[in-house]
Image (cartoon, helix red, strand yellow):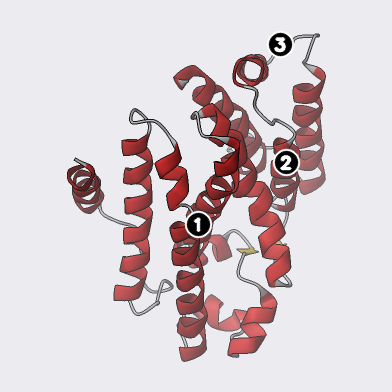
Amino acid sequence: MRPAVHALYAFVRQADELVDGPGRPADPAARREALDGLENELFEAHGRGSSNPAVTALVDAAVRHDLPLDELRAYMDSMRVDCGPVRMATRDDLDVYMDGSAAAVGRVMAPLLGAPPAASESFARLGVAFQLTNFIRDVREDWELDRMYLAREDFARWGVCEEEILRGEATAGFRALLAEEVGRARELFAGGAAAVASVGPGVRPGMRMARAVYMRVLDRVERLDYDVLARRAALSPWEASRVMLGSLRAAA
């Protein structure tokens, strides 16, 4: 199982490096073209092989574990969105993006980790919960990359404008918007609990730890009164370690 997980990670990491890595192509069009090439290489490798070891390993893992690699087409679509400035007009746009960037990988991970088919969507919800938590935590950092993953229609509904983000001003409307997103993330984590229960005992502790750490990030956002513009809501190493140990004790 572990080599197959490594293969999946290596492939999606290669895509991420084409978008955000230090050696990425110089302009958005070239980045999208490079992503097209990587995607084509993956889906043309069956029966032909590939010079890319990550592609070769992932194709082998797909055969061994019957993985739904077609899900990675949606992942690559989301990576193409990230090649230029990002603005999500509607909540539906954000949901489509996260279905590719997170849910699709969760659906590939489900059979890889030995979960039954019925658990696939629970893995998808868990993946989106992780992704949405990142977006909540990283509003300021994403803005510095000319990316805003919170939907503009939600900005309008709460009376938030991008200039306030630029100034680092967490208005009452911004805090209300973040509180709403935290509530959505918590609902997704609750819906993803079945994913943890569906896997074997060798996998379950790691999934519990990851879920506990990310839920603690949401706790920290709440303690900051949703002002993620003045201070980052990431956990310190000692706090993350304490959460991980606590999740193991709770499972014992």
Q: Residue at x 69, y 43 (%)?
A: 75
Using the image as rendered, state which of residue 194 and residue 78 is in the foreground.
194
Q: Amino acid at mark 3?
A: Ser
Q: Residue at x 50, y 77 (%)?
A: 180
Q: Amino acid at mark 1?
A: Ala
Rendered location of residue 159, percent (x, y)? 60, 90
Q: Secondary structure at mark 1?
A: helix
Residue indicated by mark 1: 129
Q: Amino acid at mark 2?
A: Met
Count residues near mark 3 (Cα–Cα under 10 Å), then give few for <14, some for 14-19, many for 20+.
Answer: few
Mark whose residue sits in front, 1 or 2: 1
Residue 26 shows up from this direction: no
Count residues near mark 1 (Cα–Cα under 10 Å), then give few for <14, some for 14-19, many for 20+.
Answer: many
State the mark number for residue 111: none
Rendered location of residue 192, percent (x, y)? 48, 52
Relative to residue 26, is residue 216 depicted above or below? below
In the drawing, does residue 243 fall left or right of residue 52?
left
Count residues near mark 2 (Cα–Cα under 10 Å), then give few for <14, some for 14-19, many for 20+.
Answer: many
**Upstream in sequence: badge 1 or badge 3:** 3
Residue indicated by mark 3: 51
